[in-house]
Image (spheres, rainbow, N blue to C red):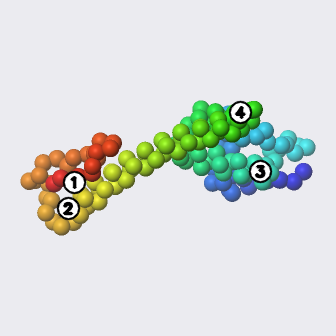
Amino acid sequence: MTGYAPGEVAQRTGLTVDTLRYYEREGLVGPIARSAGGQRRYDEDDVAWIGLVTCLRDAGLGIAELRRFTDLLRTEAGAADRVAFLRARRAELEEQAERILAAVRVLDGKIAHYAQGSGDGTAHGPTPGPPAPGAAATVAG
């Protein structure tokens, strides 16, 4: 039987063998074919799917959400259900990206402020945190 051994897949995907096994136990990948000796053998489709699961995981989806998406693909769910699921996750990522960009702007302002030597921390009081979601990012001393 051809295919990739777990160690090869771990190296190609940047995951550990334990993570690959965990994803299989959770039903996120597989079932993975086995050699005559019982060793897991991954094919290109398995590796591609692991890449997608890893991307979605990196995007913040939890195991339950990944399991839900996998179920949508493995059942008779229509494309509309899959699209709705992905659009909802995308909207969440957009909101998170906006919050992160607001925080980056605040940090950039603070860096510029302190780099000019005008902020020794004694005259301005505490440094405010990032703005509330949807608020304009203003940088105070």
Q: What residue type is labelled 1?
A: Val
Sort mark 4 into few (<14), some (14-19) or many (20+) by Cα contacts within 10 Å: few
Residue 139, disc:
1
Q: In this view, does 110 lie to the left or right of 14?
A: left
From what the image shows, is residue 72 above or below residue 131?
above
Q: Which residue is disc 2 drawn over?
A: 113
For marks 1 and 3, give the CA distance.
Answer: 49 Å
Question: Of label 4 and label 3, which has the lower sequence position?
Answer: 3
Pick the front one: 71 or 26: 71
Q: Which residue is disc 4 drawn over?
A: 77
For marks 4 and 3, give the CA distance.
Answer: 21 Å
Question: Of label 3 and label 2, which has the lower sequence position?
Answer: 3
The location of residue 105, given as percent across then percent down, is 31, 56
- Residue for point 27% across, 51% down: 137
For marks 4 and 1, give the CA distance.
Answer: 48 Å
The location of residue 10, given as percent across then percent down, is 68, 52
Question: Of label 4 and label 2, which has the lower sequence position?
Answer: 4
- Residue for point 28% across, 45% down: 135
Q: What residue type is labelled 3?
A: Asp
Q: Is residue 131 left or right of residue 46?
A: left
Q: Would you say residue 92 is visible in this rendering?
A: yes
Q: What residue type is labelled 2?
A: His
Pick the front one: 66 or 31: 66
Question: Of label 1 and label 3, which has the lower sequence position?
Answer: 3
Q: Is mark 3 on a helix, strand or loop?
A: helix
- CB within 8 Å, label 1 to label 2: yes
